[in-house]
Amino acid sequence: GQNIDQPTEMTATEGAIVQINCTYQTSGFNGLFWYQQHAGEAPTFLSYNVLDGLEEKGRFSSFLSRSKGYSYLLLKELQMKDSASYLCAVIRARGGATNKLIFGTGTLLAVQP
Amino acid sequence: DTAVSQTPKYLVTQMGNDKSIKCEQNLGHDTMYWYKQDSKKFLKIMFSYNNKELIINETVPNRFSPKSPDKAHLNLHINSLELGDSAVYFCASSQGTGGETQYFGPGTRLLVL
């Protein structure tokens, strides 16, 4: 089976740093994605980790520890436009070459002035 | 140019009706998906097609029937709509089936009355 846990909601202040954690349990782990979803819009790709360590992309960084089943998304210099849901999603390898993307329930981040 | 497009954006209909949602991608991807996002914002895969072949079918009621006329199009037909079918349906595409980044369409908001 699979299980992905994220905090439901978080609040942070403009200009600050926030870390959104994700823990997962799944068989056939084959990578982890972070997506951003603004209200009423489609999820958009933020980052992908398959090896342990930190991937940095501008103000956003994502970390993965495969042995701990743990990832986090770090957002620096928060802006009001960063208010959105952040979805952690795990790639689970299936038979053959087909993989499946399994989403967590998402973390709703509210950035306050 | 819109990479992944869906029509219609909004769909309001009566219980028992049959409706279709269409999806098209111009990214040249081989794989397309349908996801359902419920009122709690949980995003769950329903179907996936690779080069017009069904590769993922996630225990979805058989009232839902996907069809892929070519690898750039994936449609979803729903028979005998029920109240519980009310949700946002997202189409997505990726280059392959090995866990590549998925790109989402804008979503179709279905409300069954």
Image (tube, coloured by chain):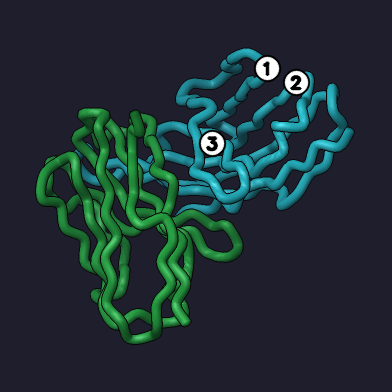
The residue sitting at 48% across, 21% down in the picture is A51
Q: Is residue A95 above or below residue A33?
A: below
- Foreground residue, B111 or A69? B111
In the picture, one chain is green; tell me its letter.
Answer: B
Classify residue A54 by image quadrant: top right
How far across and how far down the image is residue A35, in percent? 54, 36
Q: Chain under label 1? A: A
Indicate the secondary structure of the residue bearing disc 3. strand
As rendered, which of A85 and B88 lies closer to the eye? Answer: B88
Q: Nearer the viewer, residue A68 or A91?
A: A91
Instruction: Report the residue marked by disc 1.
Output: A59
In space, the residues marked 3 and 1 are separated at their CA atoms by 15 Å
Q: Which three-letter amino acid code belongs to the residue tagged 3?
A: Tyr
Which amino acid lies under the numbered mark 2 shown in the image of this protein?
Answer: Lys
For label 2, the residue is A76
Placement of B103 over or under B55, stated as above or below: above
